[in-house]
Image (cartoon, grey):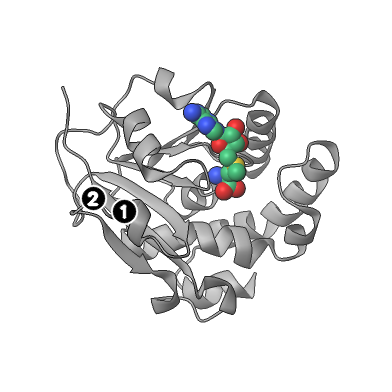
Amino acid sequence: MKEITTYFPDLTEDQKDKFERLKDLYKDWNLKINVVSRKDIDEIYTRHVLHSLGIAKVQSFLPGSKVMDVGTGGGFPGIPLAILFPEVQFHLVDSIGKKIKVVNEVAEGLGLENVKTSNCRVEEVDEQYDFIVSRAVAQMETFVRWVKGKVAKKSNHELKNGILYLKGGDLSEELGKYKTAKIYPLSDYFKEDFFETKSVVHLPMKYKG
Ligand SMILES: C[S@@+](CC[C@H](N)C(=O)[O-])C[C@H]1O[C@@H](n2cnc3c(N)ncnc32)[C@H](O)[C@@H]1O
């Protein structure tokens, strides 16, 4: 938990309480439905929570904005971001029902009122968002195809509306054709070895009405 307060020192007591309770909730649910590897549960704050919050270091979401987490699995990056930004509406989507069940239980257990979930493929979602976030779901080309038409027209943030994707390793080939993609290495924000090869990719996307 110290990992979180070190890098996010301005958390309210309510946010700290939610982040603290998150570990036990995942521990309990993971025994019934495996969403986080056993090894990772002990390092949940670095490997899942802080990693998810890396997106917030790149772009702080404005109150009233809408964010979709595609292929959220057990709720990453969506749940930690929803705790950090209580005035932002989060839509967490996954095609596997039992994963969405865990997300619903964790969101309810934490009392998160800014999270809605859908058990469907993202291609079926028909809404627009300021940002679409994700981790470990698909190659960028496939992902861009899936989320086309789901980006809101008006950009209100410093970064243009579009995708904020948590990626690892060498991205030159995967992102070669996306000239407007920008890579933000997470080692610029977090000193833990885990983040050495990890980054947030921002890809602005045009509104397709
Ligand atoms: C490797 S898991 C990653 C989970 C989570 N984002 C994380 O990083 O912990 C990939 C998830 O994407 C979901 N997924 C894959 N394709 C999808 C699609 N087209 N629509 C919705 N969910 C999808 C899978 O069901 C799976 O839960």
Does 123 appear above or below 195?
above
Q: How many marks?
A: 2
Q: Position of residue 17 (x, y in %)?
A: 63, 58
Q: Are marks 1 and 2 in contact (CB under 8 Å)?
A: yes
Image side of residue 29 versus residue 131, left or right? right
Could you tell me which residue is drawn at 43 percent across and 70 percent down? 186
Residue 201 visible within the image = yes
Taking depth in this image into account, of 43 and 3 the one nearest to the observer is 43
User: What residue is pinned by disc 2?
Assistant: 178
Asked whether mark 2 lies closer than 8 Å to ligand 1, one says no
- Quick one: 162 or 115, which is closer to the camera? 162
Give 36 or 169, whichever is nearer the viewer: 169
Reply above or below: 116 against 172.
Answer: above
Is 22 situated left or right of 194 in this image? right
Q: Which quadrant: the N terminus?
A: bottom right
Residue drawn 42% across the image and 18% down it: 124
Q: Residues within 10 Å of mark 2 (few under 14, many from 20)?
A: some
* Numbered disc 1: secondary structure: helix
Q: Position of residue 118 (x, y in %)?
A: 52, 24
Residue 163 drawn at (x, y percent)? 32, 45
Q: CA distance from mark 1 to mark 2?
A: 5 Å
Residue 75 makes an appearance in the image: no
Residue at mark 1:
175
Query: Picture coordinates of residue 40 (x, y %)?
Result: 73, 60
Label 1: how many residues lie within 10 Å, few (<14), some (14-19) or many (20+)?
some
